[in-house]
Amino acid sequence: MEDLKAKTSPESAATKAKKEVIEEVKPRSDRHIWGVIIFLLLVSVISLYSASSREVASSANVYGPILRHGGMLLAGLVIMIVLERVHYRFFKPVIPIFAAASVVMMVYVLIAGDIINGARRSFTFLGVMIQPAEFLKMSSVLVIALIMSRMQEPNGVKTKGVLWSALSVILFSGLLFTQGLTNTILLMAISLSMMMIGGVQFKKLALVLVAYAVIGGAALGYKMLSSESRAAEAAAGTQVEKLDRSTTWQARVERFIGDGKPKYEQDITPENRQEMYSYFAQANGGIFGQFPGNSREASRLPLAFSDYIYAIIIEESGMFGGLALIVVYMWLLTRSGRIAGRCRKSFPALLVLGLAVMIVFQALFHMGIVTGVFPVSGQPLPLISKGGSSILITSIAFGMMLSVSRYGMQPRPKKNKKKKFSLFITSTESDGENLAKL
């Protein structure tokens, strides 16, 4: 009997050890990212309930706006759960298709899209408004991640990889430029950040920055000259009606620079009423806020549910609430950096960090515009503002990030010390070589 126990004991111990190893390497998505998602969803529902006062006043169904927004958030949550369980390597063949579809949608919008605020911005598909600008921003991140992951070398990224990445950004920026300057600047900022993260050498990065500045300056100069030409035609009575946003940009920049007069001394005009009511909301919030549902300015602030929802958040939760939201977005970026530092290869590392940069930069741009740091422009607050395209793209981004955290990270042994995270991705292993290690 004792011999029998001795024979079976090693097998039991081996089986137990095997089970422990299996449990240790079992893929799991990052709980911190899920925490950020849940927090943003809660803030979105609570804030939009207050920010939709203007819509509720003109709607037969009082709960209609919040129910529609809740339905979009629920659909986004389903997208995240589905993509979380898809291995990130299956995203690669879809990236060129996604980017090409985004370009086609944008070209269609420029030709025959719906006119919103003096520009062709969207089109309606199956009753849903689609804004290709959101798709182009994500396409830029995906394309750069794919190109630079395939063009890694011991000292950084090959010149060919930097060139192709910059050309793709210039193409996307050229399409976005006709709709607004902010999206173009945001796209270039995201691409430069990804190049820094990807290990592009400083000299190459400086050349890309100069190229962006020269091409962007030339395009802006052309827009301004054409605007002056149309103004002269209008004065002569020979102007042909065209969609032109350059005068809008110029007016917003001039208003932002101002004449040195403090905001609180300026009169409210049709041109500045959005920003002025936004400042009123933030001032009314004070330190601790008026608490959810007590917003005073939501009923008269245009686009309070989208472009200015951060003002309503500050009014209801105060300065502490506004700062807490910034911390949550920055934590998402920090956590993505930790995930990238434990990735087996460069593509998932670039993907998770690039998507995080896209979300966080857009959030910071939104906050900067609302608080008066940047000139007025329309930028939704990711996963909080109302908007089908913004919620869809942000949900896809979060789903991809969760997939990378689930399948892309190298399992960390329990006894090993934590490795120091490096910001720059310098892995030179090819995807084919690393795929065998999965």
Image: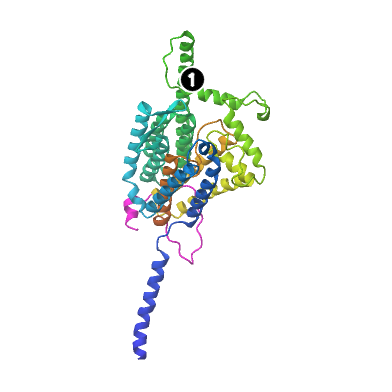
Quadrant in the picture for residue 276: top right
Q: Position of residue 129 (x, y in %)?
A: 40, 36
User: Residue 29 occupies which quadrant of the picture?
Assistant: bottom left
Q: Residue furthest front?
A: 60
Residue under the image location 58 percent in, 23 percent down: 254
Using the image, determine if residue 220 lies above or below residue 32.
Answer: above
Using the image as rendered, state which of residue 327 and residue 290 is in the foreground. 290
Q: Within 10 Å of the Cα at label 1, are there few (<14), some (14-19), or many (20+) other Cα atoms?
A: some
The answer to whether residue 215 is left or right of residue 250 is left
State whether residue 321 is above or below residue 165: below
Residue matched to label 1: 224
Magenta range: 409-438
Q: Can residue 372 be spotted in the picture?
A: no
Q: Amino acid at mark 1?
A: Met
- Residue 95 location in percent, x, y? 34, 43
Q: Position of residue 170 (x, y in %)?
A: 41, 31
Which quarter of the rendered picture does the C terminus lie within? bottom left
